[in-house]
Amino acid sequence: MRILIGEVKDHIDSEVEISGWAQNIRIMSSVLFIELRDVSGTVQGVLLKKGNEELFNSLKNVPRESILSITGLAVRSQAKIGYEVQVKNLEVINKAEAPLPLGVTDKIESDIETRLENRFLDLRRPEKLSIFKVQSTISNAIRNYFVQHGFIEIHSPKIVAAATEGGTELFPVKYFERNAYLSQSPQLYKEIMMAAGFDKVFEVAPAFRAEEHNTPRHINEFTSIDMEMSFVSDEDVMNVLEDVIKAAGKSVAESNERELEILGVKKPSLDYDFKRITYSDYVKMANERGFEIKDGEDLSTPILKSVGADIKEFYFITRWPRELKPFYVQPFDDKYSRGFDLQFGEMEITSGAQRVHLPDVLISNLKSKGLNPESFNFYVNAFRYGMPPHAGWAIGLERLTMVMLDIANIRETTLFPRDRTRITP
Ligand code: ATP
């Protein structure tokens, strides 16, 4: 039975069977060393020429990254990790072509375009694999949190007839004789689920945004972790968000020690205090730094960079102007809303809000944003026959992974990123 290379250490002085990629084969006159790698790590296999001449010679023509299967004796040794495998049998299962379009073990990385073009090879690098092991921990921790707290998982449609937030950033699709779009967000559907009486729902699914420009934090298909709850306020769901982020951080700290070490990052801190800063106070902070913005204007990237540079942790920006938030966000007063963002430093990770629940307010908000309530009938109707007060938020999984691992480009936390110029692989 094959075991993982990471398990060999538990089988010292026994025979083991391991399989994986030959990341290096070094041939000396009488002995040959094979560095074999799988998802769990690498180990050195040693083959003596004496008594194995045919096999020994055949391995001279095996290119790097070929798939091998080895059986042999696991023994303690001088190898860096303290043990190795004395090869008894070796099978070349699938030879790799040479040369490789991208080196897997090279000290210096290729440029990102070459890496993305050959992503399957790029992802063989332990530090790339580690990013996605951590991402898996994060999404599982969040999913577990929801399940443990009684949320119902939903799957809303990704082909939709109307935009969630107006017409921009939409990908049109041909839908027989009609026009349809790829969903930007499950927003309207998760609210409809509140009218349906589901009380607490979550969804982990792709969201599509036609972002015109390439930036380090935007991709055109991202994974949105959405939640919505009934009979709660913006404050309540901010508290849930805080708990969710802490649960994810705790889980990464507990389960990904090896990956954090490979990536050279510290364990996520568990005692951030998730400060609440109102939008208006943020504007004041920006103006104290020499920016000149009026209360009501959006917070530009330079402002978020400057103010955010000093807040190297998670914090909320609350009470955004109604003008800057979508129609479904509940007003706080004439000018401000119950919409909030969660930031880490300069980066927005989540936006959320208490939502409008009265149909009249919803219709007047739609109109004031220049949208036609008629085209949102399927949604507005859900507010007419008993809609509870509700609130929720959406986290971008790739952005959360970026901040937890201190990674600057969202393409690194996305398996196969779609940006302005890339839709393959
Ligand atoms: P931004 O202002 O950064 O463009 P947004 O305000 O459009 O983001 P929302 O519509 O509020 O974002 O989406 C909620 C969350 O989804 C964001 O906080 C972010 O984590 C994630 N997100 C949104 N757009 C993208 C994108 N193009 N690529 C990656 N993640 C995104």
Image: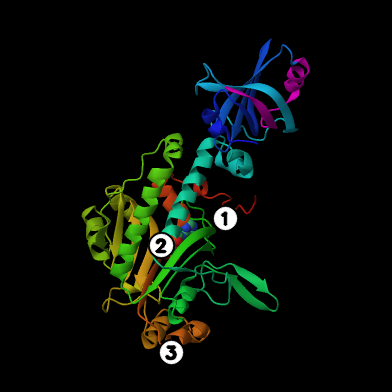
Q: What's the residue at 52%, 48% (across, down)?
A: 411
User: Which quadrant does ligand 1 occupy?
Assistant: bottom left
Mark before the other along the chain sequence, 3 or 1: 3
Residue that mark 1 sits on: 420
Ligand 1 lies under 8 Å from the Cβ of mark 2: no
Residue that mark 2 sits on: 148
Quadrant of the rendered structure where residue 173 is?
bottom right
> Label 3: few (<14), some or many (≥20) within 10 Å?
few
Q: What's the residue at 28%, 51% (across, down)?
A: 272
Mark before the other along the chain sequence, 2 or 3: 2
**Which kind of residue does numbered mark 1 sit on?**
Arg
Of tags 3 and 1, the one toward the viewer is 3
Of tags 2 and 1, the one toward the viewer is 2
- Residue 355 in percent (x, y) is at 37, 76
Q: Is residue 136 magenta?
A: no
**Which kind of residue does numbered mark 3 sit on?**
Tyr
Residue that mark 3 sits on: 385
Q: CA distance from mark 3 to mark 1?
A: 42 Å
Position of 221 with respect to 51 (left or right) is left
Q: Are marks 3 and 1 in contact (CB under 8 Å)?
A: no
Q: Which labelled disc corresponds to residue 214? A: none
Quadrant of the rendered structure where residue 53 is?
top right
Determine if residue 250 is in view: yes
